[in-house]
Image (cartoon, rainbow, N blue to C red):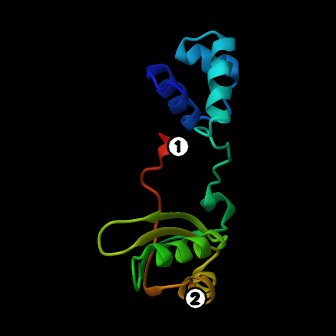
Amino acid sequence: MIFDRMTDLILRHLQQDGRLTNAELAHRVGLSPSACLRRVKLLEQTGVIQGYRAIVDRNATHSMATVIVQITLERQTEECLGQFEKSVRNCPEVKECYLMTGDADYLLRVEARDMSDYERIHKEELSRMPGVVRIQSNFAIRPVVQEWKK
């Protein structure tokens, strides 16, 4: 896959609006519809584009609180990291997980219905994951910047 200015432009437009028709996307990036479709299909086939999804406004649905969680493990061995990562992938409330530098080993974005639901997630899920020695939780008040809303 060749990454050039056109590929970057296509990806930028699709990240802003994944529901663009091929004709509209082609017009915006200055390609013919057939050339644009070939590039998008290649991006999908090679795994650069991994999928499309709906971004739901949690305030409109009154359904979720966002909790930013820092996890510190007892050791940073490959085995310990691997066991934690396997476990965190099986927790449906964890929407994102990043291996970090700095004080914490991992940064998680967790979605909970409310404080009591997060207490359950903390007690039954996060604290039982292998190697966890410290959990620091912060509740998000509201998003200020979200890439897909630019």
Residue nearest the viewer, comparing 65 with 50: 50
Q: Residues within 10 Å of mark 2 (few under 14, many from 20)?
A: some
Q: Tell me which residue sits at (62%, 68%) in the image.
A: 89
Task: Give, as a three-letter code, the residue at label 1.
Answer: Trp
Give the amino acid at mark 2.
Arg
Quadrant (top left, top right, bottom left, bottom right) of the N terminus: top right
Instruction: Please state if 96 lies on the left or on the right of 102 as rendered.
Output: right
Q: Considering only order in the chain, which callout, 2 or 1, is on the residue closer to the N terminus?
A: 2
Q: Which residue is mark 2?
A: 128
Q: Taking 43 as reference, is 105 above or below it?
A: below
Seen in the image, is 125 located left or right of residue 9? Answer: right
Residue 113: percent from left, percent from top: 64, 75
Q: Position of residue 26 (x, y in %)?
A: 61, 16
Outermost residue, top direction? Answer: 32
**Quick one: 103 or 84, which is closer to the camera?**
84
In percent of the image, x 42 and y 82: which residue is there? 73
> Percent position (x, y) of residue 36?
63, 18
Position of residue 21 relative to residue 69, above or below, is above
Pair 1/2: label in front: 2
Residue 56 horizontal side relative to residue 67, left or right: right
Q: CA distance from mark 1 to mark 2?
A: 33 Å
Residue at disc 1, secondary structure = helix
Q: Residue at x 46, y 63 (%)?
A: 98
Residue placed under numbered mark 1 in the picture: 148
Residue ID at (63%, 9%): 32
Query: Does 6 sit above or below residue 91?
Result: above
Q: Residues within 10 Å of mark 1 (few under 14, many from 20)?
A: few
Whether label 1 touches label 2, CB < 8 Å? no
